[in-house]
Image (tube, rainbow, N blue to C red):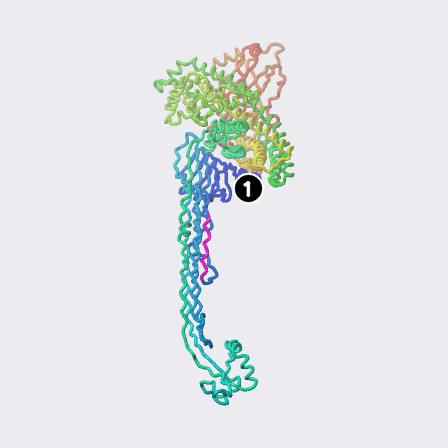
């Protein structure tokens, strides 16, 4: 686990919104928030499909914003809520004549969001909407209820000659008024879209909309209540009833009755129905009581009249409320927003870039570069180049990031991996020694670092635990600073040593060239016989002087000259030793490395190279000469050395070319060291900044959950594992050198598992090689002898006897040694003795001291005849030649008990001794190199 990809993405979410800092490409739809603003810092952001922010603000800051087919950013405001569909009216309790209920107003549409884009480039068609949201539709008004039915007139019998009023029908009730429609929801105001592209970027193809939102559709009022119907009329009968008393005028029964009736006693004719009792009691109660108590009587009733009442009138229809309805159905559109597409300067872009994001991004670049070996992808180069240009004007922490990017860019330009190694570059320490160091130191240290880092993430929300982890990180950073200081001193020393060797290498080239010029006419005539018009010596010189691109890989890539100047100014201002390292050999002027690639033959290649050299300005010709393609070198050398007329100069011509190549390789290695030195400066600055800031925050008890704290811890973690990975990287290189093959080491150092896996791969390769029978076999010490005089011209030998310095190149194809050397695959030397032929020492002359230098560019030969090239730091050893039969002052072995892997003898050498002491030895006839070392059986390319 540990630094999984999500550790390169820091999300900070709070009430203010989401801030995303991502070193990995971001798919916008997976990050954008719809309830709060979103801010994203990334190298690349991809828009896929429709990405809706629901009107929330969106800020994108990136190198590349990529719109896929039919993709769109929609920051339009949301639809107003409530938003009613037609017909969903409020319903009252359906009481007669009740007014319709008013509808609920539609909701207002959301405002369009603010979309801010600052990008280096927009790929695809940018379609962006930030319109106001449409208003919601109001609720339709409720219907008015029908008016109440008028009461029906009363029908019945009265016993008084008077028509009752309640016999008339009642008037119908009025219908209920319409319910008003809910008001239209107002549309949201249009948003804002601002797009800024880095000046010089491609033209933007875009469609941007910021219209104001439309109001919601008008709702409708209810219908008015119908009129209430009038009540029906009633019919009334007037009935008169009188008692018929006895003894009246008509006889014993009184004679008051108009109609005879059977006597039924005093109460026979009374109507005691509930509706008539009050009337009877009021009118006849006293009489009836008196009479009925004495004499029985009966009532005589008759109908006086029957009449109808009046029918009730109908009520009115409900009120339509026309004016009020109109007021709720006439809302206009909301105001539009605005859009602006403009240009951002480099300073503008940098000012709006987040520092924590930059640190994460560069950590990702570094790890991607580690996984790419010496061939970082074009995309990675472009990304590095873009951010290098952006950071060029920065200050403070920006300088650290700029230096890291510059170092990567420089290494990529030189064809090196992230650790400054070419495919051919190897360490001097033997594989077995590295294997033990990795096991005992690198992996155990990396595990400890990872454990602490995981604890930090595990307790990220625990303030006290976070304080403790940050304090541990501070101590780790302090320790790391000491390690970085030592590494920086080592790199500076190596760079200064290599720089100091360059004048000597230049002198070797010039000396070899002068030797060729001694036979200029003879060689020119010889080559012209085969190739009319060709000047062989000038051709060789042209092949050796592809000028000035040594540290660039193309001046058009990443404007490195400007970067060089800025870094120089920045670091020299602090009084460092960079001014010692910064030499004209690191200046970038031009690059002719590609000039001969299109040639169809060696002849064409040579002609193109010569033409390119001829175009150089005089000041450019003073700059360092570059390495010719390996195959081209070999073809030119073979063509030259096979000329019969040049027999005496075969070795000199070969030596000249190899001197140039060795010198140019040293320049490449020097520039690689310089790039590493700059990177170490940046790492030192980072550690120093972290210590200061983290110490201040822990002392003040500040909240340590901030993104920068996680960024700081991640940077410490990444750098620490990077150093552990460097040791595994060197182990892999040493393993490849042991078996005589170049390798491009690629692996991630984002977690311990990846580093351990790379180590296991190396061990597995070693086991596989051993199972294929590739034993290391020792040479009999001193049994392999090279007579150096066979490798130089007479002029060079005379110069040696005079000045005590002999420059030569040992090659396997020399006719005196080829038959033996072809059966020594993977030959390495770990010891050297020098003997002199014809020496006549003076009395007291017991030992002659030698300084022997191999300049770091060498060849190993597998079982076939094609060499494998390697380079390493120059090696200088001291050798003593005894004259009195005693042992040399130093033993032959310089491997320190196999700590060092040894070097190939097939390289350019320089031996030096005291010139006066050499002259005192008399007529020296020869110098023998006696080698100790080993071969590796079964060495294959």
From the viewer's side, name the closer residue of 83 and 913: 83
Q: Is residue 295 above or below residue 804?
A: below
The stretch of residues the image draws in magenta is: 97-107
Q: Badge 1, how many Cα within 10 Å: few under 14, some, many 20+?
A: few
Residue 934 place in picture, x, y as percent = 56, 28
Does the image show residue 817?
no
Q: Is residue 160 above or below residue 546?
A: below
From the viewer's side, name the closer residue of 866 and 398: 398
Instruction: Check residue 542 for magenta coloring.
Output: no
Residue 818 place in picture, x, y as percent = 48, 24
Q: How many marks?
A: 1
Does the image show residue 135?
yes
Q: Residue furthest front?
A: 249
Q: Is residue 278 above or below residue 483?
A: below
Q: Residue furthest left?
A: 532
Q: Residue furthest bottom?
A: 252
From the viewer's side, name the closer residue of 468 and 592: 468
Residue 535 place in picture, x, y as percent = 38, 17
Task: Say which quadrant the N terminus sits in.
Answer: top right
Instruction: Check residue 103 for magenta coloring.
Output: yes
From the viewer's side, name the closer residue of 814 and 621: 621
Give the SS element for disc 1. Answer: loop
Q: Which residue is labeled 1 in the image?
A: 15
> Principal SS element in the magenta part?
loop
Residue 128 place in picture, x, y as percent = 42, 40
């Amino acid at each position: 686990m540990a630094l999984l990809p999500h550790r390169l993405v820091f999300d900070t979410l709070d009430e203010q919104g989401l801030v995303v800092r991502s070193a990995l490409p971001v798919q916008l739809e997976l990050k954008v928030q719809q309830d709060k603003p979103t801010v994203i810092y990334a190298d690349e952001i991809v828009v896929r499909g429709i990405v809706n922010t629901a009107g929330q603000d969106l800020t994108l800051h990136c190198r590349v914003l990529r719109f896929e087919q039919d993709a769109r950013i929609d920051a339009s405001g949301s639809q107003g809520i409530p938003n009613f569909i037609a017909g969903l009216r409020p319903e009252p309790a359906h009481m007669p004549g009740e007014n319709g209920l008013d509808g609920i107003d539609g909701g207002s549409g959301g405002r369009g969001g603010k979309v801010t884009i600052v990008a280096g480039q927009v790929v695809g068609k940018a379609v962006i909407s930030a319109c106001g949201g449409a208003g919601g539709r109001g609720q339709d008004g409720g219907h008015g209820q029908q008016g109440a039915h008028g009461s029906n007139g009363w029908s019945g019998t009265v016993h008084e000659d008077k028509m009752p009023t309640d016999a008339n029908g009642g008037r119908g009730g009025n219908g209920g008024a319409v319910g008003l429609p809910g008001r239209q929801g107002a549309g949201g105001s249009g948003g804002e879209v601002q797009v800024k592209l880095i000046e010089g970027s491609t033209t933007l193809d875009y469609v941007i909309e910021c219209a104001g939102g439309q109001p919601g559709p008008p709702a409708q009022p209810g219908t008015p209540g119908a009129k209430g119907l009038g009540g029906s009329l009633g019919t009334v009968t007037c009935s008169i009833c009188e008692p018929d008393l006895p003894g009246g005028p008509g006889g014993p029964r009184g004679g008051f009755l108009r109609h005879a009736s059977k006597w039924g006693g005093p109460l026979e004719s009374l109507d005691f129905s509930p509706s008539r009792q009050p009337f009877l009691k009021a009118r006849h109660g006293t009489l009836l009581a008196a009479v009925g108590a004495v004499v029985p009587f009966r009532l005589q009733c008759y109908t006086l009249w029957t009449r109808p009442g009046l029918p009730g009138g109908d009520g009115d229809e409900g009120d339509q409320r026309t004016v009020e309805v109109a007021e709720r159905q006439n809302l206009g559109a909301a105001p539009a927003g605005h859009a602006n597409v403009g240009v951002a300067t480099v300073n503008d872009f940098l000012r709006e870039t987040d520092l924590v994001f930059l640190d994460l991004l560069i950590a990702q670049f570094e790890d991607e570069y580690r996984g790419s070996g010496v061939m970082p992808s074009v995309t990675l180069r472009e990304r590095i180049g873009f951010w290098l240009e952006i950071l060029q004007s920065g200050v403070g922490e920006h300088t650290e990031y700029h230096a890291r990017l510059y170092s990567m860019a420089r290494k990529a330009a030189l064809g090196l991996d992230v650790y400054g190694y070419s495919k051919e570059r190897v360490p001097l320490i033997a594989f077995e020694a590295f294997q033990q160091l990795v096991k005992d130191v690198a992996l155990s240290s990396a595990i400890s670092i990872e454990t602490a880092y995981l604890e930090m993430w595990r307790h990220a929300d625990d303030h006290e635990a976070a304080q403790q982890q940050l304090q541990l990180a501070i101590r780790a950073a302090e320790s790391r600073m000491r390690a970085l200081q030592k590494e920086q001193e080592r790199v500076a020393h190596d760079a200064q040593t290599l720089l100091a060797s360059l004048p000597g290498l230049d002198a070797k080239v010039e000396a070899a060239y002068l030797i060729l010029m001694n036979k200029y006419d003879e060689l020119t005539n010889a080559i012209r016989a085969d190739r009319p018009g060709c000047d062989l010596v000038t051709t060789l010189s042209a092949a050796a002087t592809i000028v000035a691109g040594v540290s660039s890989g193309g001046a058009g890539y990443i404007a490195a000259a400007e970067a060089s100047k800025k870094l120089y100014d920045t670091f020299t201002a602090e009084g460092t030793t960079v001014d010692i390292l910064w030499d004209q050999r690191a200046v970038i002027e031009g690059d002719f490395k590609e000039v001969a690639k299109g040639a169809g033959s060696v002849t064409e290649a040579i002609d193109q190279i010569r033409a390119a050299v001829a175009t150089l300005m005089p000041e450019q010709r003073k700059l360092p000469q570059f390495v010719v393609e390996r195959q081209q070198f070999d073809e030119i050398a073979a063509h030259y050395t096979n000329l019969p007329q040049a027999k005496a100069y075969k070795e000199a011509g070969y030596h000249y070319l190899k001197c140039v190549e060795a010198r140019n390789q040293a320049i490449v290695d020097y520039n690689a060291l310089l790039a590493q030195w700059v990177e170490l400066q940046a790492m030192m600055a980072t550690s120093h900044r972290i210590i200061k800031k983290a110490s201040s925050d822990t002392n003040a008890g500040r909240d340590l959950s901030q993104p920068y704290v996680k960024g700081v811890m991640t940077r410490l973690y990444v750098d620490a594992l990077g150093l552990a990975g460097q040791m595994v990287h060197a182990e892999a290189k040493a393993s490849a050198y042991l078996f005589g093959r170049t390798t491009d080491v690629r692996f991630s150092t984002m977690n311990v598992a990846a580093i351990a896996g790379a180590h296991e791969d190396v061990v597995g390769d070693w086991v596989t090689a051993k199972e294929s029978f590739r034993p290391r076999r020792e040479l009999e010490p001193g049994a392999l002898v090279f007579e150096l005089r066979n490798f130089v011209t007479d002029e060079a030998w005379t110069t040696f006897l005079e000045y005590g310095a002999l420059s030569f190149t040992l090659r396997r194809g020399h006719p005196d040694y080829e038959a033996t050397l072809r059966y020594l695959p993977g030959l390495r030397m770990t010891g050297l003795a020098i003997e002199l032929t014809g020496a006549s020492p003076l009395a007291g002359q017991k030992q002659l001291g030698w300084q022997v230098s191999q300049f770091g560019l060498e060849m190993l030969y597998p079982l076939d005849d094609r060499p494998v090239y390697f380079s390493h730091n120059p090696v200088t050893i001291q050798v003593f030649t005894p004259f009195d039969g005693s042992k040399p002052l130093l033993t032959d072995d310089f491997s320190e008990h196999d700590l060092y892997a040894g070097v190939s003898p097939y390289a350019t050498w320089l031996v030096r001794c005291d010139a006066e002491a050499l002259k005192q030895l008399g007529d020296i006839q020869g110098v023998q190199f006696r080698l100790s070392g080993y071969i590796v059986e079964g060495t294959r390319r």
